[in-house]
Image: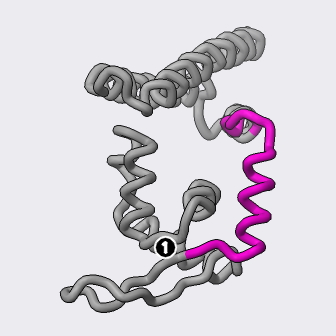
Amino acid sequence: MQDAVLAMLAKEPSHGYHLRARLRQSLGPLGESMNPGQIYVTLTRLEKAGLVVCERADGLPERPERKVYALTPAGQRRVAAWLAEVGWPKPDLAEFHLKLAAAAAARLADPVELVAAQRRELLRRLREVQQAMLAEPEGSGAGPLLEGVVLRLRADLRWLDTCERAWSKADEVEGG
């Protein structure tokens, strides 16, 4: 989220409220789950890291002073680096694999059951995103994002099928 906030500030200095509204608009239904205070926590962290500066600005009569955030040169460099990155978000497959291996080795849990629990969670998320897609107005800017989330979840579900087959075979080998 920090990089997204920095990127939005690269366009123009802004109030936290305005940044939050822009993020929610960009994320569509996924932005609805964003904690209202999260933007201010993020801005504080970015300020402490020297990536943004905060200035007081005259506001409305009921809000005489408001904080306006702007990028520092370090913040501008970070945005440029972030935009230049080439990659795709990846789940931590290695961590999940290690969880399965450790659970099996220590007999803490059945890896196949862990895969099943993960599958239930992914299916729940998939249903939520599909419902959000159906509720989204045609031509919405969030449509491609939501479709990408659906495709990603489906790929993760296929990977879980692979995990289940592998760990089921391991159980057969161990069991006799």
The answer to which of 131 and 55 lies nearer the viewer is: 55
Which quadrant is home to the N terminus?
Answer: bottom right
Point out the stretch of residues depicted in magenta. Answer: 70-94
Q: Position of residue 37 (x, y in %)?
A: 38, 69
The answer to which of 96 and 37 lies nearer the viewer is: 37
Residue 63 within the magenta-colored segment of the rendering = no
Q: Is residue 132 above or below residue 9?
A: above
Which quadrant is home to the C terminus?
Answer: top right
> Does residue 51 appear to the left or right of 140 in the view shown?
right
Please name the residue shown 80% across and 44% down the image: 85
Q: Position of residue 53 (x, y in %)?
A: 61, 82
The answer to which of 148 and 169 lies nearer the viewer is: 148
Is disc 1 surrounded by few (<14), some (14 to 19) or many (20+) residues within 10 Å?
few
Q: Position of residue 67 (x, y in %)?
A: 44, 83
Please name the residue shown 49% across and 22% down the image: 147
> Does residue 148 appear to the left or right of 140 in the view shown?
right
- Which residue was labeled with disc 1? 41
Q: Amino acid at mark 1?
A: Val
Residue 117 visible? The answer is: no
